[in-house]
Amino acid sequence: MPDMKRRTLLAGMAAVPAAACTELAETEAATDLFDAVEGWHRVAHRTLAGRQALAREYSLGQRSPDIRGNGSLTVETPEYQAALVNGFPDWRLEVGGLVDNPLSLSLDDLRALPQRTQITRHDCVEGWSAIAQWTGPQLSDLLDRARLREEANFVVFRCADNLNGSDYYESVDMVDAYHPQTIVAHLLNGEPIPEKNGAPLRMRIERQLGYKHAKYLTGIEAVASFDDIGEGKGGYWEDRSGYQWYAGI
């Protein structure tokens, strides 16, 4: 688990007004934190937005009749198709990278953990939205069980789908990783997640746009930087299409 002093500072920075950035940057504690992350633009995201606030949650009656698929609608490998037919009995979620206790979790393992259910709105960068109920363990619980190391600054999500010859991936920093509504979802509206929506596992990053909600999840990797991952910008679309790494809403 990251040092509590550091996590408390991260949380406090989310509420700092923009006008205080210069003053904050001159303090020893803030300077140490800034050195631990990649670039002032990412620090600015922390200071300019109330990122600890919860995304709005809705009632059962407000759910959308259908949650459309977007991006990859399946994984076209024989291994995935066989797993899909059989209900994913051998699917594993690997939690590794900068951790002291790597995890390899089956779907049953994930179901046995404490669960969070939330009804939230999915906002796509293409302009459409939908409200749905999602259930799964909190990412923070997995990271704590894996014993995250101090030098970990980001969490990378590895996926089974491959687009144009490159494996899909996404990432968040520790503010979003430890947000209470960030979950590894395995249920959509009380049922196993459908193929088009990322079966059997997908991330829910409720304070960010839909392309951050990685589907067909196979791995969670704690890293210090993105230097050796893809094009170094923190995500598949960020590497290729100029999407912003932080897609807050």
Image (tube, rainbow, N blue to C red):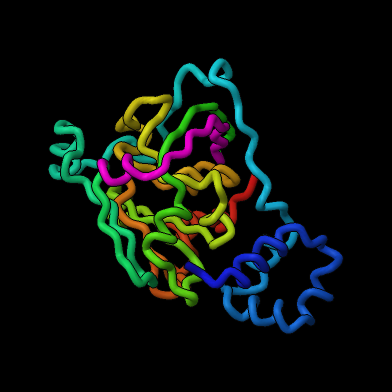
Of 60 and 164, the residue lying toward us: 60
Where is residue 114 shown, x and y percent of the image?
Answer: 41, 43
Residue lying at 38% horizontally and 60% vertically, measured from the top left: 145
Left or right: 138 as drawn, with respect to 57: left
Tell me the quarter of the picture where residue 129 sits. top right
Residue 162 visible at all: no
On screen, 121 above or below 27?
A: above
Left or right: 75 as drawn, with respect to 126: left
Residue lying at 48% horizontally and 28% vertically, measured from the top left: 133
On screen, 189 above or below 230?
A: above
Of 46 and 119, the residue lying toward us: 119
Of 36 and 248, the residue lying toward us: 36
Residue lying at 54% horizontally and 62% vertically, measured from the top left: 174
On screen, 59 above or below 23?
A: above
On screen, 212 above or below 154?
A: above
> Is 112 part of what is drawn in magenta?
yes
Tell me the quarter of the picture where residue 23 sits. bottom right
Count numbered badges in the picture: 0
Residue lying at 47% horizontally and 58% vertically, measured from the top left: 171
> Is 201 part of what is drawn in magenta?
no
Where is residue 149 shown, x and y percent of the image?
Answer: 44, 73
Q: Which residues are magenta?
A: 108-125
Where is residue 126 shown, x and y percent of the image?
Answer: 55, 37
Residue 159 visible at all: yes
Where is residue 209 shown, x and y percent of the image?
Answer: 56, 44
